[in-house]
Amino acid sequence: MHERTLAYLRGRFGDYYRQTGIDSPPDAHAREWGYVPWTEGPGETYVRHNSLLDLGDLGDFLVRERPKHVYFSAGRYENPSETTMDGKGWLSSDLIFDLDADHLPGTSPDDSYAEMLAACKDALRRLLDFLREDFAFEDLTIVFSGSRGYHVHVRDDNVQHLDRDARREIVDYVRGIGLGFDALVEEETVGGTVGRESPANNRYLPTDGGWGERIHGELLSLMAEVREMDEAEAVERLQTYEGVGEKKARTAYKFTQNRFVEIERGNLSAHNVFENLAGQFVPRVVADQNAPIDEPVSTDTNRLIRLPGSLHGGSGLAVRPIPAAELDGFDPLVDAIPETFRGHDITVEVTDGGTVELDADSFTLQEAVHTVPEYLGVFLMARGRAEKARE
């Protein structure tokens, strides 16, 4: 990055912080703070092990230092500015989740920025479903990371003192790691038949939440589809699954016509085909419905995470908090553009040409000098794809 580019970005980041109020996280004085200053040459300097007492008032610090990146810790400490973790004196930690479009299964380097972020938002919705429905967490802060993903901060009281092993269990659950089919099935004792003293056990998939409900939903969807077919078509469809022969397929089809309510109840004992199918659905349901989080972030009680409201030095976009009710309509490539960078043009020398999607528009730029909207110029310079040209 040329000196002129660095000076421009640092100056404009300072203008943003002068014009923008940044909220501190809860218990800000008990957290460790870190930042990356603008420096010349390759690589970055990571300044950490600071407390707010070291930095001073947060707003004043941001205006004065105009950092490239700003972070605070998930953890709270007795002495946050100590340079060793033992010395800090850990007290508690938020539970942090990080979703990055670069690491999502199914995304490709050939996907556009907008496509990758859309896929990441879909993964975020799945994560939020786990956190709200399966764990009943309530104190959630949703944040666009400023680049390629989203963060979720969980601050419920019952997560604050979880150790790494307990956090690992939550991670494994939302990722579907080690999910065993038998562990999902519930058993219900029913009365024995005449002349038998021993009762029988019916096996059920839960229909009221968790991975069991997700597996049941897949089974129910298939059998509802089969129910609407004629018998020959239904039998052929069911035989595409391992272990389902013609006879079993035919009796299962008849079951959908006469006793579909048992399938709705999740009763696997009603017909052995149902348990067979449900077991086969587990890998696919896990692959399709897990939340592909960055696992080390969530297990780390000392993790530093980006400050909501700050600027991302690799994009010039804001690390934007998102109210839950506004998530569906949130477009990061529009809503995370700082107002400071809107309304005027600048001149940049593009060194890595191509197409950029920003502000509901598409820009295709050759490697040359261009006059562009400032938010686009800042994005290109922060990405290392342009240098500031003389006006």
Image: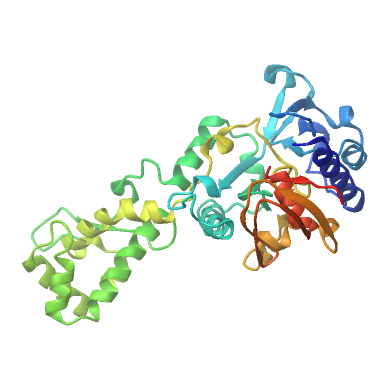
Query: Where is residue 72 drawn, in percent x and y?
Result: 74, 36
Count of numbered tags = 0
Q: Quadrant of the N terminus?
A: top right
Query: Where is residue 27 drawn, in percent x and y?
Result: 80, 38
**Is 109 situated left or right of 158 in this image?**
left
**Is 8 situated left or right of 158 in this image?**
right
**Is 126 situated left or right of 89 in this image?**
left
Looking at the rendering, which quadrant does residue 167 occupy? top right
Query: Where is residue 110 drawn, in percent x and y?
Result: 48, 53
Q: Is residue 163 above or below residue 220?
A: above
Q: Identify which residue is drawn at 76% across, 26% down.
A: 48
Residue situated in front as seen by the camera: 100 or 140? 100
Q: Is residue 218 above or below residue 140?
A: below
> In this view of the protein, can residue 316 be seen by the observer?
no
Q: Is residue 62 above or below residue 261?
A: above
Q: Residue furthest front?
A: 368
Q: Identify which residue is drawn at 14% across, 54% down.
A: 197
> In this view of the protein, can residue 29 be seen by the observer?
yes
Give the colouring mode of the picture. Answer: rainbow
Looking at the rendering, which quadrant does residue 69 occupy? top right
Residue situated in front as seen by the camera: 162 or 2? 2
Looking at the rendering, which quadrant does residue 75 occupy? top right
Q: Identify which residue is drawn at 65% across, 38% down.
A: 160
Query: Where is residue 12 drawn, in percent x and y?
Result: 86, 47
Residue situated in front as seen by the camera: 210 or 388? 388
Q: Identify which residue is drawn at 89% across, 37% down.
A: 61
